[in-house]
Image: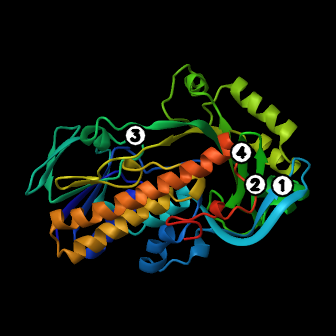
Amino acid sequence: MPSVAVVGGSLGGLTAALLLRDLGCEVTVYERSSSTLQARGAGIAVLDQTLRYPVERQGIAAAQFCSRTDWIRFLEADGSIRHEQRHRYRFSSWNALYRTLLGGLDPGCYRLGREVTSFESDDASVTVQFADGQQEGVDLLVCADGISSAARSALLPAVSPRYAGYVAWRGVVPEGQLTSAAYDALHDALTYQLLPASHILVYPIPGLDGACNEGHRLMNVVWYRNVPADELAALLTDRTGQQRAISLPPGAARDEVVAEMRSYAGEHLAPAIAEVVTSIPDPFIQAVFDIEVPRMVAGRACLIGDAAFAVRPHAAAGTAKAAEDGWVLARELQAARGDVPAALRAWEAEQLALGRALLARTREIGDSSQFTGGFQPGDPRLIFGLHGPGR
């Protein structure tokens, strides 16, 4: 089996590395950060594809790193229930998934502080160039370097993120700090509230220590609010005056921006949801972008996850898509008996189709909420899924 370099040590890169390692490939992950990764307050709805490696290959029960809800519930501004339906979801945190996947990889295969600056691919191999001047030759390069992918910029300079017209305010509050009324309203459900040209989701995720039992979890918030393109730069300017391109991390948003958000929340959100939102100590902001690529392969290099398709969060399928890219790549490489070009040809056709379909679906859902007014409680389109609602 071929030797493999994976650029990017986040969830998609780790999943691909583990699967290719299991296949018999010699795999090394190169992560430019000098320390293990961490994402504060990043909740994730966990689809089957995201769970697949920990459950099937690591033998870890989902309950060990996922919370569970049994209801989808829409609240009115006064806190009354507008709509509810039984539907089971699992939720986790970025940190919990990262720790779970990283624990399955030999530490010597995960290289921190190794920034890839360029690479060259020909019919026989890929030569990877690092910032420290060193080079590495491999048979396959998997680029999992995220929404700001340097690999994508090098391969497809005409492709750039397209701003969707809105941002997500995010953050967490310890479930144990909620009043009993807020806890009772929120602890067992994925809870929505619809507002004019906006919607908000609240759901429980594992605590910072990984605890998944009720009362010890975090309540996670994702609130989509429209921001005109010509106002985005001002919103993403942090406390020091630095303009960020995509997001503001916890603690970076300016006081007046946070104050406006909290004031609006107190006036317009259901009491339980408003309590959570206004209690977040360090809310952060992620601008919503679309990225679509015309191809995912160049020679013996490929783009996976957000490096290829960055999709809006409304299908909760971003991490699932990255994981599926890895599963299908391993399958095709095995079917091709290690023939990298043959495997990449088959893999690319399938993953391009999946990425395009998922991007179109998430655009439709997002636009119906934020712009066209077609987002309605109980709409089956809203059920999370990678290959379609509930799939």
- Amino acid type at circle 4 is Gly
Q: Amino acid at mark 1?
A: Leu
Instruction: Provide the residue designation for mark 4.
Output: 373
Q: Are marks 4 and 3 in contact (CB under 8 Å)?
A: no
The local secondary structure at tag 2 comes to strand
- Say the numbered circle drawn on residue 41: none
Q: Is residue 140 visible?
A: yes
Is there a contact, CB below 8 Å, between mark 2 and mark 3?
no
Evaluate if marks 1 and 3 touch, with contact meaning CB atoms under 8 Å apart: no
Q: Residues within 10 Å of mark 1 (few under 14, many from 20)?
A: many
Dividing the image into 4 quarters, which one contains the N terminus? bottom left
Do the numbered discs 2 and 1 sit on residues whose CB atoms are within 8 Å?
Answer: yes
Give the distance between the C-alpha atoms of the residues marked 1 and 3, in whole angstroms: 36 Å
Q: Earlier in the sequence, mark 2 or mark 1?
A: 1
Q: Which image quadrant: the C terminus?
A: bottom right
Q: Which residue is mark 2?
A: 192
Per the image, the residue denoted by label 3 is 148
Q: Calculate the distance from the C-alpha at mark 4 to the C-alpha at mark 2.
A: 15 Å
Query: Which amino acid is tagged 3?
Result: Ser
> What is the number of the mark on residue 75?
1
Percent x, y for residue 302?
26, 54
Q: Amino acid at mark 2?
A: Tyr
Q: CA distance from mark 4 to mark 3?
A: 31 Å
Residue 373 location (% of width, % of height)? 71, 45
Q: Position of residue 224 (x, y in %)?
A: 66, 42
Circle 3 residues within 10 Å: few <14, some 14–19, many ≥20 = some
